[in-house]
Amino acid sequence: MSVPGPVRRDVPSRPVAAGLALAAVVLTVAGGWWHTGSPLIAVEFPTPSRPADAGAVTSAAAWGYALVACYGLGLYLGTAAAGWVWRTPPARAAVRFGLTATGVAVVSHLIENTLLLVAGGELPGDSALAHSVTALAVAKYSAVVPAALIAVTGAAVLVWRCVAHSATTTQHRAELVLDTVPPRPIAPDDPPLPVDPDVRATRWRQAYTVPDARPDLVSQRWHDGEHTTGFCLSGGGIRAASVALGALRTLREELLSARYLVSVSGGGFTAGALQLALTGAGSPPPGGTVERDPETVFTAGTAEFNHIRRHSSYLADSPGEVLAALGRIARGLVLSLAVLFGPALVLGVAAGWLYQRVPLTSLSSDPIAYPTPRFGAAVAVVVLALCAFLFGMLAQRDPHGRGPAARLATDFAVLAWIVAGVAVVVPALAWASAWLLSHTDRAVDVGASVGALVLTYLSAVSAMAWRNRARLRRRFGFLRRSADKPTAVVPDGLTQRLLVIVTTGVLALLWLLLLGAAVMTEGRADALWTAAATLVVVVVLGGVFDVTSLSLHPFYRERVARAFAVRVLRRHSDGQKVAVPYDPAEGTTLSAYGVAADGVPFPEVVFAAAANLKGEHRTPPGLGAVSFTMSAKWTGGPDVGWVRTDDLERISGERIRRDLTVQGAVALSGAAFASAMGRLSRWFQVLLAVSGARLGAWLPNPGFVRQAREAARRGDWAYPWLPKVRRLPYLVREVFGSHPHHDRLLHVSDGAHYDNLGLVELFRRRCTRIYCIDASNDQPPSARTLAEALELAREELGVRVELHEPWRADAGSARPELSGHPLADRMAVSPVITGTVHYPPESGLDEGVTGELIVVRGVLWPEVPYALQAYALHHPQFPNDSTGDQWFDHGEFASYTELGARMGEAVRARTTARSPVGNPPTPPAATARRSPAERN
């Protein structure tokens, strides 16, 4: 996997680089201003209101060679500066395009000057020479604009890094001691790993890369009759958290003898609660002594369990809090739209100013007079497209297709599209906007904007509420369906999806109309002042504020912490135990708070999230995400690299460190609503990004951290470093679904977007006994989530699992034995599925080492108590309430925690009743109660 690189040794010293960058800006800006006031424009784009003066044209053409030298040198220096600071493959492609555009602009200008001097500055109106000059001018201006943007931006970034990356700062970064593990390579240009003579199934071997995981120790313990045990808690919001609370209450002895506790999404609520209750970090609350008893914490009847029970509707448990949540969505929507729509106004006004000074196509607000492109513009498009075709033909001779001809073919094709856009598309868009505004009054215009805002808000709420529809129907009677009501022609799911698609389309249309209307201002003074003010707002919101702060992620993190982050305090005054919530200002850093207190036996907690990587074929097909785990020791995954968590906390900015906490890890692992959601619809993701109703966040890329430190050690001061704030470009990437693997930050979201059980992470750590608490809400008749996890493990790790009678855990499997029972169609024979895990040689385990898989599913079976069966009769959704229902009442919380406790009992009954075959015996308690470090 590549990250921004490679390290460059041709970057000049800071003073020289700063001087060249400033010269590039001055020369480019001076050349551009000289251009827009040149008499050549009158002959390049003749209009009746601007007659050409032959003498002035000849003089300007003569001086044009100096002008070419001025802006040509500025563009070249600026593009070189961009090459020194932009290291990612897309950025390098942009630099190459900038050089090509500079060459096209310079050559076009030189030919144009020569033709004008030969003609003496006089060109007949419809002559071939006049059209040729227009075509050259169109190509010149269309190439100059993107080249200037690249050059000026690159030069500005270089000047900033000259200041920010001082010699002292670079030396400090070079001296940083960062413990990192490189990501596994996929593409030919990925950074190399240490030489490995073993060539067997390289992909599988590298997928087992987990720092501190020792396959030799796992094999030795297996031969000694001991298991390496892991627990995994599935996703499913508060439903999964409740089931996990009950199951871990019953399986507490097995949990405390385990090496790992992997949690996903809602399972992380419970794992995080246990971790924060048992940690020794932080200052204890006054007035008492913190109790850390791993055997009784969060068991039934305790103060901390009662705290969660009272906050099971953790997002909002009162009308006031519901309004507050809706207000947070509305605030995020307004701020996000301001940041996203502001650039449309700024770009439109800037484009209108340019069209007013350089009329490539005459703008028209007359509904009859459509802005007809100039013939010379069509010639420019054809010539550039022909050049792209010819270079493409030459590129076919290159067996790898990566030579200069292939790059030039792409660059000329892009230039042809740019010419078509500035000559045809933008004027047409401006004309359409003017026509629409001229046929509607101001009230309609304002009403349309407000209506779009309201529609976006309702669609965002709808996108989240759809998964909570069953709960809403129970709470609000008018939403209930009548039993005899015929099925709707359009299913609710399709209706909701259509609403999302329509809203997204309306927003895109309004953005384009705003751009077109701004172009029609043609550089008026009031429009320029408005654009300047808008630019300030966009820069402040997108450049100063953290875009994650504009989303629902902070709100979600705070609400989860309010319900699940508590300490158990024995009061000095009366000896009573109470649950004391963590102070919101207390930063529960993952490296410190993610470890149990000294002497407290508890497994290593691993929060399983997902790093979204899209559009580069670096993820399992159809997923769009790879493994990303967060623990007290390490953060990252095999595909993105690893970095020590305490090192990552040390080099990250304050705002990013808020998410490198136990509470942040819990929230990110459960970030179900995000702008990137694995297999889910792209339409939903765009809407959630635009509306601000997103829960994911951007975290440092471990692979980049490793590469940036190496660059500092080699003295490459121009190499980028981690941003302190997640600015506007990251919001834009969320909207367009751009999640490159080489970026400084990775978009991290719900672990269910990769594996909703956490099984793959335990397989990756080579566990020989795995307890899987599956509350993933699979709809009958099969355990789809389990099947998907096992398939992913087989493809990613080469793990083969042989299940033993898995159909006995499916709803309805007990029907033949329960004739006449009202729940017969929903009853399984048993909730437990067992299996044998076969690891491949690439795992590093000794031959013959196998594992034991014990999965307990959240289903009904005949042995569940009468109270649960009665609850299920009156609640047809139980035990499959929607994950979108995060407002549990007392009955739901009590039923799911009791179900989890009975699931744990079923596991114990199944595992003690069967004698292990081909597996080592269960380790004795005296051996099992070692610390996590001793167990691995």
Image (cartoon, rainbow, N blue to C red):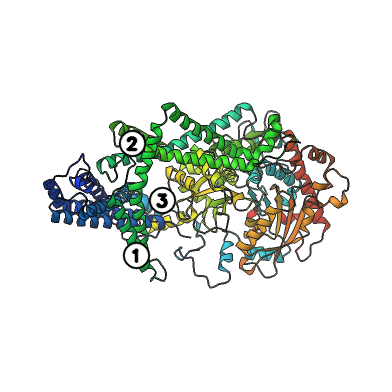
Residue lying at the far left in this picture: please name it.
55
Res 471 visible: yes
Q: What element carries label 2?
A: loop
Q: What element carries label 1?
A: helix
Distance of mark 3 from mark 1, alpha carbons?
37 Å
Give 827 or 572, whichever is nearer the viewer.
Answer: 827
The numbered mark at residue 721 is 3
Select label 2 or label 3 by which is in front: 2
Would you call the spot at circle 1 few (<14 residues within 10 Å), some (14-19), or many (20 or more)? many
Query: What x and y, as percent, mark residue 570?
Result: 68, 34
Give 913 or 528, whichever is nearer the viewer.
Answer: 528
Please report the residue visible at 22 percent of the width from the left and 53 percent of the height from the top: 133
Would you call the spot at circle 3 few (<14 residues within 10 Å), some (14-19), or many (20 or more)? many
- Quickly name the residue at label 2: 366
Quadrant of residue 442 within the rendered picture: top left
Quadrant for the C terminus, please: bottom right
Quadrant of residue 912 within the rendered picture: bottom right
Give 30 or 296, whichever is nearer the viewer.
Answer: 30
Dot 2 or dot 3, earlier in sequence: 2
Distance of mark 2 from mark 3, alpha carbons?
51 Å
